[in-house]
Amino acid sequence: MNRFTYYAQYHQKKNRVIEKIKEALLAAAFLLFFLEWVFLILWLKVNGLEMIWFPVSLLVVWIAVYRLLRYVSQKRQKKAEAEYRRAYISEKTLTDDRLGTIVFEWDSLNEEMKSVSCALPPFGNARPDTVYVIIQDDTSPEEALELIREALHAAYDRMPEILDKCREYVKETYDDEDIRDAQGEPITREEIERDLSLTVFTVSIHRNACPGVAVTVEGDMLHDYGEHIAEHGVSVELMRDTDGGEWHFLGR
């Protein structure tokens, strides 16, 4: 295990411990708040309004302390996020005649990139607005940009097939679950074609192992018929093996 991997794992474990502590403290705080309300009710039953300021003041103190701690926590969180960005986040830009300009934020700790600005051409009826990149080997972000270019080109080259596969999957799902429109009629392919929206690309880079370089085109249906596609979406994955050959579809 190299130093970078060790530090990344240590950082993740530390964050998990901190989150568990925060959850425990929050649970204790709300339990105390509940007990103070019980105390106030019992006070009113036993003492009426006599010295009511005492239990009320306990509630006021709790609220003041809670709001103060929340303010301090949010301030520290913002500071930690700013320090993280200074240490690990940088911008990488991909410029291509076909794809336009895509600006990524590169997270060197998690070895991930996400587009923060892109002007991709339409994909079917929609214009993709997000590109995620996951690097699973020692590929540098600069090397990754070229692989991202190739992956997106492959997706656009196979766009008609991808759209057909997505429409076919949605139609099969609707028919299997007997999903119908407002008039009680089966959903037609024309309606699916109209409402299908593919807006996200996820590029996975692992040049020295299967699946090599892969790109997943993801989206959903703009019209929610109450089906489970609204929950998990629809996607098609293209893969290129380690030999750098042709791209081919995975799964369906």
Image (spheres, rainbow, N blue to C red):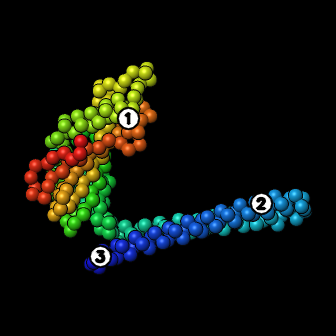
Describe the element under mark 3 as helix, strand or loop.
helix
The answer to whether 7 is drawn above or below residue 102 in the figure is: below
Kindly identify the amino acid type of the residue bearing the numbered disc 3. Phe
Asked if the residues shown at circle 2 and circle 3 are in contact, with their CB atoms under 8 angstroms apart, the answer is no
Q: Residue at x 14, y 48 (%)?
A: 247
> Which picture quadrant has residue 168?
top left
* Vertical position of residue 190 compared to residue 72: above or below: above
Residue nearest the observer in this picture, 239 or 58 = 239
- Which amino acid is tagged 1? Leu
Which amino acid, by three-letter code, is at mark 2? Answer: Val
The residue to which callout 1 is attached is 222
Identify residue for label 3.
4
Q: Residue at x 79, y 63 (%)?
A: 39
Q: Quadrant of residue 91?
A: bottom left
Which tag, 1 or 3, sits closer to the chain's start? 3
Find residue 217 and report its horizontal and vertical position in percent. 26, 45
Distance (Cα) linking label 1 and label 3: 43 Å
Q: Residue 248: x and y, percent?
A: 15, 46
How far, Cα to Cα, is label 1 from label 2?
48 Å
Q: Which residue is mark 2?
A: 38
Mark 1 nearby-residue class (10 Å; few <14, some 14–19, many ≥20): few
